Structure formats: C-alpha cells, structure tokens
Image (spheres, rainbow, N blue to C red):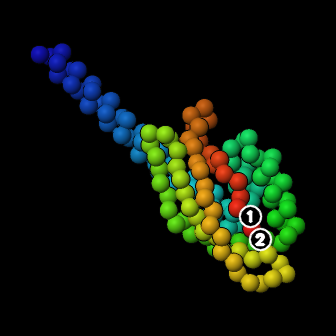
Amino acid sequence: MARLVKGFLAVIFLMLTACATQTGLSEEFDRSVKAYNRLLRWHEIESAGATYLDPELQEDFLKQTETLKKKGLSVTDFRILSSKYIPEKKSGDVIAEFDYYILPSNRIKTISYHQDWVYQESIKSWKLKSKLPAFE
C-alpha cells in the first residue's frame, strides 16, 4: 500500500513539474517577444538581432539592417496583434504591426511582421526564425 501511495505521489510531482516548466517557457516566450519588438521600436535593430535571432540568420539580418539604416528607417510604434505559444513544439507564432517612416518622407506607414519563434534547448533561449519585413 505504501508503495502505491509513493508511486501516486511521484506521478503527481512529475505532472506538477511539467506544468511549471511549460508555464516558465510561456512566460519566457512572452518576455522575449516583447523585448525583441521593443528593441526594434527603439532603433536597436543590431542588438535585437544579436540577442534574439537564430544564429543562421544573423549575417543576412545585419545586411538588411545596414540597408534599412541607409534608407533612413524610423520605427515609431509597434503592437503585438497575436501571440501563440505552442507547448508541444516549443515554438511560438507572433504577428506584430509596426508604424514607421523612411526619410525624407514623414508619412507614417504600417506593416505586419509575422514572427516564428523556437525554443532552443541547447542554449535555453527563445530564438527568432524570421527575417525582418520589407520596409518600403
């Protein structure tokens, strides 16, 4: 009987641990998404890429940021329209919207930015698998 109770308690403990881990990943996902998009908003594009972008995409990302800087891109605001954490895949899907202008124009434009995120176990961090949108 004592073995049965111990086994039952062990199963409950494992279930609670799994739930706590999923909650932690979900909260970390939300923090990463907000931090990345805030960095873009405050003209810290290189820092956003270095911190949150998948290493395989960083070289192209840096080239794109140089082009955007030369064009005179200025992001004025952003909104997270949807954010979905997918626990079974340890991934996330985000749709953000950015308001921006490109000098010399002062006309504000809006663009949607679909972001695919994945949790990388090896570095215990969320990484973005999407390029920047085509700010035009």
Determine which residue is flagged by label 1.
134
Compared with residue 39, is residue 121 higher up or lower down, i.e. above or below? above
Determine which residue is flagged by label 2.
136
Which amino acid is tagged 2? Glu
- Say if mark 2 contacts mark 1, CB within 8 Å: yes
Q: Is residue 92 visible from the viewing direction of this image?
A: yes
Residue 42 in picture, x, y percent from top left: 70, 67
Measure how far apart labels 2 and 1 are at the Cα level: 6 Å
Compared with residue 9, is residue 90 higher up or lower down, i.e. above or below? below
Residue 126 placement: quadrant? top right
Residue 101 in picture, x, y percent from top left: 75, 77
Count of number-bearing discs: 2
Q: In the image, what residue occupies the spot 68% across and 44% down? A: 54
Q: Is residue 55 left or right of residue 25?
A: right
> From the image, which quarter does the N terminus lie in?
top left
Residue 17 in picture, x, y percent from top left: 36, 34
Q: In the image, what residue occupies the spot 17% across and 22% down? A: 5
Q: Is residue 7 left or right of residue 101?
A: left
Q: Is residue 104 left or right of residue 40?
A: right
Q: Is residue 35 visible from the viewing direction of this image?
A: no
Extreme residue toward the right, this view = 70
Compared with residue 129, is residue 113 higher up or lower down, i.e. above or below? below
Q: Is residue 92 left or right of residue 133?
A: left
Specify few, some or many for label 1: CA neighbours under 10 Å numbering under 14, 14-19, or 20 or more: few
Which amino acid is tagged 1? Ala
Instruction: Tell me the SS state at disc 2.
Output: loop
Instruction: Tell me the SS state at disc 1.
Output: loop
Residue 75 in picture, x, y percent from top left: 71, 71
Q: In the image, what residue occupies the spot 83% across and 78% down? A: 103
